[in-house]
Amino acid sequence: MRVAVTGSQGQVALSLLERGAEQGIEILALARPQLDLADPTTVLPVMSAAKPDIIVNAAAYTAVDLAESEEALAAKINDAGASAVAQAAATLGVPVIQLSTDYVFPGDLDRPYREDDATAPINAYGRTKLAGEDAVRAATPSHVILRTSWVYSPFGKNFVRTMLALGETRPALNVVADQIGQPTAALDIADAILAICHRLTTGPRSESLFGTFHMAGTGATSWADFADLIFAEASRHGRAPVAVTRIASDAYKTAAKRPANSRLDTQKLAEAYGVRLPAWQTSVSETVNRLLAD
Ligand SMILES: NC(=O)c1ccc[n+]([C@@H]2O[C@H](COP(=O)([O-])OP(=O)(O)OC[C@H]3O[C@@H](n4cnc5c(N)ncnc54)[C@H](OP(=O)(O)O)[C@@H]3O)[C@@H](O)[C@H]2O)c1
């Protein structure tokens, strides 16, 4: 199985490269400058040359706050770029997996969001990702849109690495406690994507395998409790304790608003593919252990 992935340095792309190598699956990371989602004309030639069995669009404009002032650029990459990837998949006759986000929802429901709940993004990044979903649906019926949330990994910029870096110099930190969601390890996303790729390229392709699915770490928490677990794990590696002070979102100003409830109901994915991600605490612990080993 040859899996073409967009981007090479993103959290999900790097995780796919690592897990693919472990599982003997060929992962072709197609990145800038050869493949630039901001220039859709670059997509089909690079994809055609790669001759993939399946395409994963893991690249995106992900700077949530900056997107408030750069929405046109974010849309170019997340909407027109995603459209070009899905159109290339349609031209090549292969399925496409598109990564999307909990930020397509407003966050005012008091239960985990299901795939068919009404979308209504409250920030620019969410609007561009939702437009990208629609573009992928329009480009090909052979799509799997995976909405995920609160992604972290041993790589790149994410909450776990930020907390560990801040904790090195600060004995106390203020962390938002009134947003709840599901921390999701990019390495778990990669395992799930590869299982989905395997299923789509080998077994019979029933209609229930295509469409939109939610995929996130099992269980929910707040950013403050997430931080507490990171520091508890870090203390087992000899790090000094860090006191987490719980604050409200209003006290932590950001350019983009975040949904108060980011929880995603992942039952549909479990039923279609038998895929359920590990408990969020297990993967946070593994990631901190890996980052602080030796
Ligand atoms: N991070 C989260 O918390 C989160 C939450 C929900 C959903 N998601 C979604 O999950 C997916 C993966 O996110 P991630 O955390 O892995 O992202 P990331 O670490 O920020 O990486 C983004 C990737 O996109 C690539 N990229 C950006 N602009 C590009 C362009 N014009 N052309 C080609 N590649 C471009 C980057 O390229 P280089 O390889 O060249 O650096 C990088 O590989 C995205 O669709 C994101 O929207 C993320």
Image (cartoon, rainbow, N blue to C red):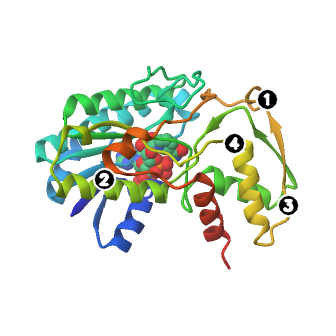
Which quadrant does the N terminus fall into?
A: bottom left
Residue ID for mark 2: 196
Using the numbered discs, state the Cα–Cα distance from disc 4 to disc 1 in whole angstroms: 14 Å
Q: Nearer the viewer, mark 4 or mark 1?
A: 4
- Residue 292, located in which quarter of the rendered image? bottom right
Secondary element at image label 1:
helix
Amino acid residing under circle 3? Pro
Q: Earlier in the sequence, mark 4 or mark 3?
A: 4
Q: Residue at horizontal 75%, vertical 32%?
A: 252
Tell whether circle 1 marks a residue whose Cβ is less than 8 angstroms from ligand 1.
no
Q: In which quarter of the view is residue 84 placed?
A: top left
Q: Amino acid at mark 4?
A: Trp
Does any portion of residue 72 appear in the rendered image? Answer: no
Tags 4 and 1 touching, CB below 8 Å = no
- Badge 3: few (under 14), some or many (20 or more) residues near its Cα, within 10 Å? some
Q: Quadrant of the C terminus?
A: bottom right
As helix, strand or loop, the secondary structure at mark 3 comes to loop
Crowding near the residue tagged with mark 2, few <14, some 14–19, many ≥20 C-alpha atoms within 10 Å: some
Nearest to N terminus: mark 4 or mark 1: 4
- Residue type at numbered disc 1: Ala
- Any mark on residue 241, and which? 3
In percent of width and height, residue 284 lies at 62, 58
Q: CA distance from mark 4 to mark 3?
A: 17 Å
Query: Given the image, on which type of amino acid does mark 2 rest?
Result: Ile
- Could you give the CA–CA distance between mark 2 and mark 4, rounded to whole angstroms? 29 Å
- Position of 110 with respect to 103 (left or right) is right
Q: Are marks 2 and 4 in contact (CB under 8 Å)?
A: no
